[in-house]
Image (cartoon, coloured by chain):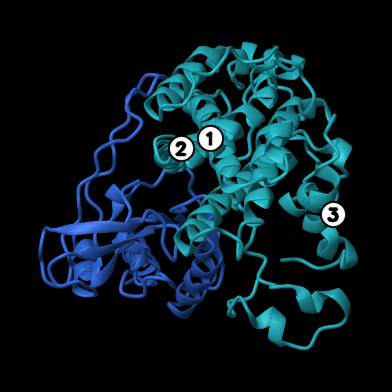
Chain colours: A cyan, B blue
């Protein structure tokens, strides 16, 4: 690795795709982190679990980025972009961990750019179309409350790398939830029109929440080893948080979560994921030798 | 005679003096992201830094800068490594760092929000300290935006001198 400025790779003469490279070799999110697997844990399973959590963040991040240049206020655009950036950072760490755990040594880019939709493990709520601003708030409220509950427990994971990534993510997710809560209160308890739009957004998001609490067999197996968190175990906490927020926002208290069904975790996605990934992956696939 | 302790101190000082590309008044030591340095038996100078936010794009630049600074201090083999645990919070910013932020018109963070150890967080909106205006010192300020130009900052305005200012978020 050279000690030159990070942009050297862009300005120097290179052949082929390498001219797109930053060329520092410094970009690995987990450089120098101890990669040892905890005793008895199946590396391939851990890798898939990291993809589940990483893909949730990556796909939601990409969806949030669609608000950039298109948000109702500059402040909200900056906020949504910042939240997307935090999630992207969580995705990078988790996908890098996946490549270490399964022994393939694949880097985060291999996971992000060179898998097809059916290989993604994110829950479908993260890929749902953008909708209006109330819809973005509703999605963020549900996802950040759920992910915060998961990550709070994952901070005690038997895998020290996952535990560290989760402990770091907790602070960020709590801040994201605060943002979503503040807007839910403002819109729900605002004008009759904003109330109506916010209530409609919650109703629209709700059918996809059952999947968040569905336990994939791999999650169950890793949870038994203390590596993963069984999503069913956060159901009551998340429902309680959402009930209190929606009630405070003068919105109807939420119904019970719909029946938990595993879908995205098994690669079964809606028609909305493929176009999102096409946008995310197009440049990397056009220049497969490039590094970033 | 150059002792191991001297070499390690030299390495620490070289890495500690590197500045943040987004907050150039702060060194990595001021920010509290330089965690450890070691000169290994084969002569490799190992430096551990920790990310502030998971997605902080300044990390790559900081790694390059640390590598360059440590080489300039006379170490030929350098490895910049990531320390993930314990997670960085704004409480890691040193008093010196806080002083420099204020001096440059950026309000330093108050204490990081305390979260309950248990799995059920009952406080959805922790009360945050209202930052003082770093320009005139007035306590009467308002939040303009919870997020700012970088991950680590929010935007505020002083009701007394009416100047807007940035604040390093408590996290």
Sort mark 1 into few (<14), some (14-19) or many (20+) by Cα contacts within 10 Å. Answer: some
Sort mark 2 into few (<14), some (14-19) or many (20+) by Cα contacts within 10 Å. Answer: few
Which residue is at a point 27% across and 68% down the rendered structure image?
B165
Q: Which mark is residue A192?
A: 2
Which residue is at a point 61% across and 13% down the rendered structure image?
A232
Pair 1/3: label in front:
1
Which residue is at a point 85% across and 74% down the rendered structure image?
A17
Q: Position of residue A235 (x, y in %)?
A: 55, 15
Q: Which mark is residue B140?
A: none
Query: Going by the picture, which residue comes out furthest to the front?
Result: A192
Label 1 resides on the chain identified as: A
Q: Position of residue A151 (x, y in %)?
A: 52, 29
Residue B41 visible in image: no
The secondary element bearing badge 1 is classed as helix
User: What is the CA distance from the residue labelled 1 to the residue labelled 3?
Assistant: 34 Å
Viewer-side residue, A3 vs A156: A156
Tell me if A158 is positioned left or right of A188 in this view: right
* Quadrant (top left, top right, bottom left, bottom right) of the N terminus of chain B: bottom left
Viewer-side residue, A44 vs B114: B114
Tell me if A119 is positioned left or right of B70 in this view: right
- Snapshot quadrant of residue A190: top left
A200 w.r.t. A254: above or below: below
Residue named by callout 3: A278
Are circles 2 and 3 on residues that touch, CB within 8 Å? no
Q: Position of residue A178 (x, y in %)?
A: 40, 39
Residue named by callout 1: A196
Are circles 2 and 1 on residues that touch, CB within 8 Å? yes
């Amino acid at each position: 690795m050279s000690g030159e400025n990070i942009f050297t790779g862009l300005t120097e003469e290179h052949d082929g795709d390498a001219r797109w490279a930053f060329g520092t070799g410094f970009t690995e999110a987990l450089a120098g982190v101890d990669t040892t697997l905890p005793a008895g844990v199946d590396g391939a399973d851990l890798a898939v679990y990291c993809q589940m959590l990483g893909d949730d963040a990556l796909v939601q991040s990409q969806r949030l980025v669609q608000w950039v240049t298109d948000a109702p206020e500059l402040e909200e655009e900056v906020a949504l972009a910042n939240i997307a950036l935090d999630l992207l950072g969580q995705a990078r760490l988790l996908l890098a961990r996946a490549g270490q755990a399964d022994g393939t040594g694949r880097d985060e880019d291999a996971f992000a750019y060179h898998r097809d939709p059916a290989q993604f493990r994110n829950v479908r709520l993260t890929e749902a179309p953008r909708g209006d601003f109330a819809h973005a708030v509703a999605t963020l409220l549900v996802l950040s409350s759920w992910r915060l509950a998961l990550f709070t427990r994952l901070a005690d994971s038997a895998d020290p790398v996952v535990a560290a990534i989760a402990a770091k993510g907790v602070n960020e997710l709590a801040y994201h939830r605060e943002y979503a809560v503040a807007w839910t209160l403002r819109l729900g308890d605002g004008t009759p029109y904003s109330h109506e739009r916010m209530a409609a957004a919650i109703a629209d998001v709700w059918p996809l929440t059952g999947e968040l609490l569905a336990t994939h067999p791999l999650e169950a197996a890793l949870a038994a080893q203390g590596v993963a968190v069984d999503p069913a175990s956060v159901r009551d906490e998340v429902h309680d948080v959402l009930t209190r927020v929606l009630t405070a926002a003068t919105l109807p208290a939420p119904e019970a979560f719909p029946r938990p069904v595993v879908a995205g975790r098994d690669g079964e996605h809606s028609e909305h994921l493929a176009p999102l990934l096409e946008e995310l992956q197009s440049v990397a696939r056009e220049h497969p030798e490039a590094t970033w | 005679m150059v002792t191991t302790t001297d070499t390690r101190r030299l390495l620490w000082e070289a890495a500690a003096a590197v500045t943040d590309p987004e907050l150039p008044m702060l060194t990595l030591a001021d920010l509290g992201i330089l965690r450890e340095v070691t000169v290994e038996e084969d002569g490799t100078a190992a430096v551990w830094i920790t990310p502030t936010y998971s997605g902080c794009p300044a990390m790559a630049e900081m790694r390059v800068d640390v590598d360059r600074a440590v080489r300039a201090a006379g170490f030929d083999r350098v490895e910049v490594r990531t320390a993930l645990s314990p997670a960085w919070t704004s409480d890691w910013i040193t008093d010196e760092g806080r002083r420099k932020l204020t001096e440059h018109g950026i309000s330093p963070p108050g204490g990081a929000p305390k979260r309950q150890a248990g799995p059920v967080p009952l406080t959805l909106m922790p009360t945050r300290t209202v930052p003082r205006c770093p320009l005139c010192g007035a306590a009467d300020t308002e939040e303009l935006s919870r997020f700012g130009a970088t991950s680590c900052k929010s935007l505020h305005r002083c009701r007394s001198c009416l100047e807007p200012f940035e604040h390093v978020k408590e996290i």
